[in-house]
Every structure is written in C-alpha cells, then in structure tokens.
Amino acid sequence: MEIVLDAVEKGALSVVGKRVPRVDGAEKATGQAIYVDDISLPKMLYGKVLRSPLAHARIKNVDVSRALCLPGVKVAISAQDLPDTCYGPFIFDTPVLARGKVLYVGDAVAAVAAVDEATALEALALIDVEYEELPPVFDTDFAMDPEAPLVHENQEAYIKTFQAVQKGNICSHTTFIEGDVEAAFNQSDYVYEDSFTTQMVQQTPIETNGTVADYDISGRLTIWTCTQAPHLMQIRICDGLHIPINKIRVVGLRTGGGFGGKVEPKTQIIAAALAQRAGKPVKLVLTRKEEFTVTSPRHSSKITVKTGVSKEGKILARTVKAVFDTGAYADDGPGITGFGGMMSLGPYKIPSYRIDGYCVYTNKMGAGAFRGFGNPQCAFATESHMDMVAERIGIDPVEFRLKNVLQNGDLSVGGIPMPSVGVKECLEKTAKAAGWGKFLGKNRGMGVACLQHISGVLSSSAIVRIHGDGTATVFTGAIDIGQGSDTTLSQIAAEELGLPMEAMSIVAADTASTPYNWAVTASRITRTNGNAVRLAAADAKRQILELAARFLEVSSEELEIVEGQITVKGSPERAMKMHDIGGISHWATRGPIIGSASVMVEGHKYDPEKVIGFPFGTMAGFVFGSHIVEVEVDEATGRVQVVNAVAAHDVGKAVNPTGVEGQIQGGLVQGLGYALFEEIIYDEKGKVINDTMLDYKIPTALDAPNITPLIVEETDPGGPFGAKGVGEPTLVGTAPAIANAVKKATGVRIMDLPLNMEKLWREMKKR
Amino acid sequence: MKATVCFSLNGEKQVVEVDPSRTLLDVIRTDLSLTGTKKGCGDGDCGGCTVLIDGVPYNSCLVLIAKVEGKEVTTIEGLEKNGQMHPIQEAFVNHGAIQCGFCTPGMIMSAKYILDKNPKPTENEIRQGISGNLCRCTGYQKIVEAIGTLAGKEV
C-alpha cells in the first residue's frame, strides 16, 4: 500500500501554502542559469545526425568512409557500429540509428562528430546511403486496413513491458469495460453519437533538445542534458548501447521547458554513442527545424463518442472509440492511448461503458507525451459532445454537467476509488466568476469544459540531510523543468522539518547524487515525489528528536520543532537549537542525520476482464478542473479572440499558490494554441512543411487572454499535506471550452481541431 | 577573412577579431562567454536572443557582428549592478514571471525597452512590447503583471 503520514495537519502550516518566490528565480533572471547549450568542455566535438529523406524505405547500404576522410571529422557511425538492439518505454521498437529500414522523413540514419558544426554538416553530405523505396502509410484508417503495408514487419518479436494487444499496424489496443453497455443504451431516452478529429501539435519548448556527452577511459559515461527524467534516461541509454546503469551518470541541467517532449531520448543516446568512439566530449543540440520534424509531438486522433441519456439528463452509458496515430515508433503511444481512453468519460459518473483505444503505426515521426498524455484529445471530443448532447435535450451545459459530476468515493475507469473529487466546486466557482448566463454582445459566446486527470503513479525516492549548522538539503531525482519542483519540494521538506525556507537547499536531477525518481511527467511530482520528500524529512525529524530527547531528558514524542528550535511541547523554555543538534551529530555522538524514503503508487488491481491491454498499474491523486472562456469572433475573417478565461483546478492543497496559478495560466494558453492554430502539417510525401516558429505559430502575449485562476483544495488523504498535482490538467479543458464558446457565438460547431480562421470562416459561410 | 569589430558591451569596450559574417549572438555566447542570451530558433522568430543595441531591442541571431561597430550593446548580464538585481529582474522573480527561464533574459531586455521608452505603459502596451518574445510556460500573464508593477517607478 501507498502511504504516508496524516495528510491534514492540525494547526497552521508555516511554509506550505505560502507564496514563496522560486528558489531558482535569481539565477534565471540574471542569465546565470546554465542550460545545455551553455556548456563547453575542452576538446569538445560537435555532433550532427544524417536523417532519412524518405518516409518508408529499405536501407540497402550505408557508407560513412568518405565522411571519415574529411579533415576535422573524428567519428562517423551508422547502425552497423552499434549493438543490434532497440529501446522504448512500452515496446522496444526504436533503434538508436535506423536498422534495415527508415520509417519516416527525418529518421536518424547516421551520425558524425567533428571539430565544429560546419565540418559536421559538411560530413553529413559525404555519407552514402542506398535506399529502396517502400510504399508509405500516412493515415490510420489505411494503416488499420489488413492490406496496408506494415511499418514494423516483426512487431511480435519486440520486448514489451505489458500484455499488448496487437494486430497489423496496431501496436496497442486498450479496452475498458463496465456494465452492460448495450442494455444501458436501450434503456436510455436519448442516444447520440458524434465524431471528432484532432491534429498533431508540437511541445515547442523555447529551448530545443540537446546533450553534451563524455565517455572516459574507465568506461564511465556522463550525460549533461535537458531532460524531464535523468533516471529514465539512464535506463534508455543502457538499453540502447548496452552500457550498465552504474556506469552512466545523467546530469539534468536547467531545462528550458519540456511539456512531455524531454521525457524520452532525443539526443542523449546518439551523443553518447559518438562520445564513446571519439574519446572526447560531444555536443549535440537539435536545430529548431529538427525539433519540429523529429521529436515526439502530440498524437493526432480520430475519436467517436456515443452517449445514452435519460430524459432527466442523467448519463447512463457511453462508448468511445479513439484511434491515435503514433507514427513510426510507439514511444509513449500505448500509454497515451490507454490513459486517454481512461479519461474519456470525463469527470462524470457513467455506470456502463466500453472504451476502445487503438495506437497505430504510420510513417510519420513518432508521437509521444505532450502535457495531458491523451487526455487533451479525448477531452476535446467528449466535452464538445457533452455540449452537443445538452443542446439536443434542452439543458444548460453547466446544469447538465452538474447533474452528472463525480463525487468523493466514486470509482475511476478501471475501478480505483477516488477519495477527493473537487469537480463540482470547480464548476460552480468558474460559472460564478465568469458570470455564466449573462448577456453577451453580438459575435460573443461563453463555453465551458470540465476535466479530470491523475497525479499519482509509479515510484520515487528522496533523501534529506541535516548539516552541521542545522540547515538541511533535499536530494531528489525530480528535475525542475520550470514547473517549480525545486521550490515546492523544498517547501514540503521545510514544513515537515519545522525549518524556514532560508535553511533549505535542494540538489536535484543528478543520477550520481540524487535518488531515483521515475520521471517529471503525469503531473506527479508534487504528490508522488512530494510524498517521498515528506517521508524522508519525517525520517530525519524523528532522528533529530530522538537525539534531542537525550539532552532534554524527555521522550522524543514530547518534542516538536518550531522555527528551527527543538522544544518540549508546552514548555518552550526547555529548548535546543537545530544548529546544536547538527553540530552534536557531526562531532560528538550518533553521527550525521540522514532521512530517506521510497514510495510506490500501488494497491489497486484491475479486473482483467474489464481492463485489457492497459500498460499502466494503478493511479492515484485524481485531480479535477473546470474552464470557462469567453470568445469574440470576427465575422469577416473567422478569427477567434479569447477575451476572458476563468479556470478552477482542484489541487488538493496548493503548496505554492503562485506556482499553481502559473501552471493554470500557462497550461490554459498552451491549450489555446492547440484549440485555435497550432498544427504540424505534412505534405503528400510525408515531410513536415511548417518547420519554423514563423510557420508553426504558438500563442504570443497578444493571443493570451487575462486569466482568472481559481484554486480548489479538496484534500487528498494520500498526498503530502493533502496536495495533488496540477501540471497537465490546466491544458486539457481549454480546447473544448473554446469550441463550445465558438458554437455559442456563431452557431457553428467545429469538430476538427484546430479551430482556425479558415475553417471557421468556411463553416460560417454555410450558415 | 577576419575583421576587427569594436563596440561597447555592457559598458565596457570590446575589440574582437572575427569573421564578420558571424552573428552577434554567436560572438557574445561563444567568443565572449556571455551565455545568458539564449538561442531558441536562430531564425529571428522566438525573441530568446533579444539584446539592446543603442537601447533598442534586436534579435541578436539576425545581427551580423560587423553591424555593431561603434554601438552600445547591452545583454542580460549588463543589468545587475554590484551584485544587485535590476528592479525588472526583481519584479520577475517576485511575481512568478519565471518558469523554465529560457525566454526570461530576452523577455527582460524587451521589458527594459518598454519601460525606458514609456515609464507608464498600459497592459496592452506591455503585451505589444513583449509580443516578439515567445514564452511557452507562463501564459504571459505574470510577466505582464511583473512589468506592470514597475509602471511609474524609477527603473
């Protein structure tokens, strides 16, 4: 079982819940923060990757010999220089460099390291590759046809981390079943079915992916990189290059945004392979064009939702069929497809359902995690559908949702009990703050969407060390990619130890010195890693009090730590300073105090008849939210301006309210780009045509509305100080809320993202 | 071919012997080790490399080094004085305007230009003024608020 301490403390909290400024704020504001491209090592070489010009082809031969003859080139490699192996998070289908076939335009075929970038680029042109072109598959409908060419010809041979249900180009089919769904549809007064599509979009962190790798004479590999997951990266490098984990050190530097795009390897393994052969450090940083064409965007999808409703407006049944285009490599696709399916009932109690998620290979870049992990696609479909159903049965969309929202103790898809469900409060607060129902002018409309997500999954660990002067350091594998974990985790430890923030420091994301954390993903750091940090701090605190008890001549249960003083409860004059405890433990007796803890989210077992082909174990820390946006549509152009937005999120306990607000505002605006204009566009040959920030637009300050963030705190008994997560869900509600608002403003229902000017203008013309 | 370029960088005279076709961004990051200025795209689209040239913001990835001959260049490293952050930097830290931090140096340089030009900018003027600086984390609101707190103050 997962757990933890009493989540809800008696008395006031002194650090948790406070608007503490970021601990990494000053270094970032002054330009002192070190990101990967700021690193330069003696004798460092520059790496470049040769990429496939074809979407699907057999590699008949790769010859790097001419490149190696170019002065300044130190290493040139292809798959034949590497172990014959593949890696991946769920399905081991990804070679470090393409072996046998290339599977998309941009697939890595060969790599070079040279004395400077210009020489490395020149060397790429000297690598000879002979291809035999194969028929490509670009569309999931075609890919699922039994006659379609196979992207992976031997997928049953791949190692898998779960019981994958596979067929043809379908690499994973996940099913969730509850109740007799056909009977429930028959009992429904109304049954409606709608189909939606969503587009491929890119994370677009302002810092592109990059790595500096160094391999020493003792066989030790060091990777300095921007990443969301140093420990996960160790495993992938081990799988890809057959270097044992104990010889791999991954140092997560300041990371310029991730949003899912820096979880799985992008540059790390190729840079490591080059450094291994060069005997010198190698820097490999992706260009913006590479970032747009070879990383791991959000899956495009085709989703059909069918819902049965009683005449009172109660939802009785739902089926969902979601097809996700995972591109050339599965990456996180099986997890994303399954998790998106799990979220596709929305935060509503639906007694009977069947959800089918299909993760399908095509010859495009491999799609992966991007803030929401399948939930943005499914929420766009299901929350648009909720409004469409409400309109057909003549109920207000907020009222329809309120009739069906989940409550404390209800079960998730898959049957996990959810002890803290704040969706009703979120919806009521946003409706009130936005003035739901008020008169809006011409071409204006207000739209709502609700959402659920998780924040507890898999394992983490933490160490807290008490120094000789009574200050403390947290050691965590979780990296601060901008979301604020260095600050939040420090606050959690400070609160547990009874120390002020000034007495804390944090060491994060270096596999040589910090304990294991799975990854900064799944909105899980505050809750899952926060539990490990809190338990480690509690372990240190226990040791502090036991030592102090010997000097104060009481039992340790009678002691407490308040503002750095250890005092006898009720007799504050009998006290010791933390400084003294630190000194005594280092120089006189007992030895230095180190607290540690490991946690795993576990306990619930899925019924194998009801949950089939799902790659994850149990989940926890279910979070909820509601977004309401007001839009104004320009009738002449179809341009949508979001003029106002209110978003409420149930975070259990806001450890740092400023940080929570920043997540809400940032996630909502990222969702605005997804809703209105972001889209990776392919030509008929499988090449991305909008590979610059000029052609792939993300929201600017002029696109972003003023956002009112509302914090709802439905305490999670399994979270540190009652806290849950907030990172991803802030994006999830935006696109459906905007589509619903546009419908109100124009009468036009857009069911295919993005809801761009041209699409809306064309539909408005048809009215 | 190399050329000698002489300019002022954060108040100090700099003389560099460089290929004149290189960019200001490349020279300040590589040759002068001022890595606070960031490269997000290299195409002049993201604003991550914004510096002030004679007080006016430029994407330094699009400025050839020869073009700054005789000019005054200010980078993020030029704002703090005697170990004290500039008020704009302090406002960004104190108002939650920083997340990943990669756009922050360029954003702060644009903020400096906004406030230098107009000590009392409106919200819309602030949004216009930073619209060439892309941020993927914050949704811009806390950045706009942080700059707004300095309106009417001596910075």
Image (cartoon, helix red, strand yellow):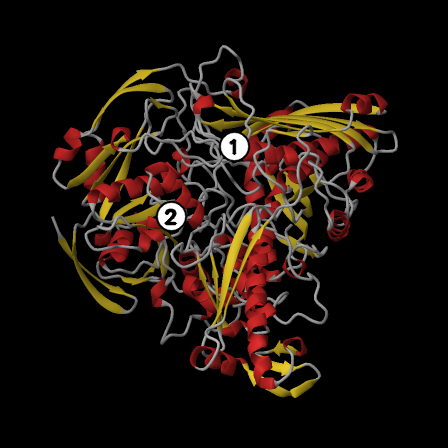
- Residue holding disc 2: B40
Asked if residue A248 shows in the view, the reply is: no
- Residue holding disc 1: A333
Q: Quadrant of the C terminus of chain A?
A: top right
Tell me the mark number nearer the camera, choosing from 2 and 1: 1
Residue at 63%, 82% (x, y): give it.
A567
Letter of the chain that mark 1 sits on in the rendering: A
Percent of width and height locating residue A409: 77, 46
Q: Amino acid at mark 1?
A: Gly
Among the 4 quarters of the image, the one containing residue A611: top right
Residue at 39%, 39% (x, y): give it.
A291
Circle on res. A608: none
Letter of the chain that mark 2 sits on in the rendering: B
Structural crowding at the residue carrying mark 2, measured as other residues with C-alpha within 10 Å and reported as few (<14), some (14–19) or many (≥20)? many
Tell me if residue A573 comes above or below residue A69 in the rendering.
below
**Local secondary structure at mark 1:** helix
**Residue located farthest toward the top when viewing the structure as drawn:** A147
Tell me if residue A342 comes above or below residue A490 in the rendering.
above
Q: Are marks 2 and 1 on the same chain?
A: no
Percent of width and height locating residue A626: 70, 46
